[in-house]
Image: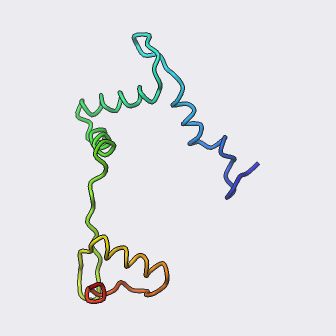
Amino acid sequence: MAGAGGRPPKEKSFANMLRIAISEATVDEHGVSKPKLRAVAEMLVTKALEGDMAAIREVADRLDGKAAQAVEISTPDGPSRLTDAELELIATASSSGAFETPPSKSQLN
């Protein structure tokens, strides 16, 4: 039986099954019981310590958050770097249908 949007009911979703599986205990090589999530986290840290760049980035992203990214758009006046407030103005106006093309720098100020 399908749930909302044609997807299976939540209790059968893959994400839910992963949550159940990762919350179960596992026994390490020393016979110590610990959550599987802890074992996965330890494997990630081990990979990072071995120099795996993807693992290093994942650890950094989880601890410090992803690095901020600059947004650059092209306007009739040329490329422009925008502040968060300017981006919010564009997003708000775009979602309300106030304009169809990006505003010029003079329209933002």
- Residue 41, quarter of the rendered image: top left
Residue 27 appears at what percent x and percent y?
47, 16
| Tag count | 0
Quarter of the rendering occupied by the C terminus:
bottom left
Q: How is the image coloured?
A: rainbow
Q: Residue at point 51% right, 31% down?
A: 22
Q: Residue at x 24, y 78 (%)?
A: 80
**Residue 105: % across, % down:** 26, 85
In the figure, is residue 81 to the left or right of 28?
Answer: left
Residue 62 point in image, percent of width and height: 33, 43
On screen, residue 27 versus residue 73, left or right, reads right
Answer left or right for 15 relative to 105: right
**Residue in front for this viewpoint, 3 or 106:** 106
Residue at the spot 69% in from the left edge and 47% down from the top edge = 9
Q: In front here: 77 or 68?
A: 68
Residue at the outermost right position: 1
Quarter of the image holding residue 77?
Answer: bottom left
The vertical placement of 99 against 91, above or below, is below
Q: Residue at x 26, y 89 (%)?
A: 106
Tell me if residue 28 comes above or below residue 55 in the rendering.
Answer: above
Residue 17 position (above or below residue 108): above
Furthest residue in direction top, as rendered: 31
Q: Position of residue 19 (x, y in %)?
A: 54, 36
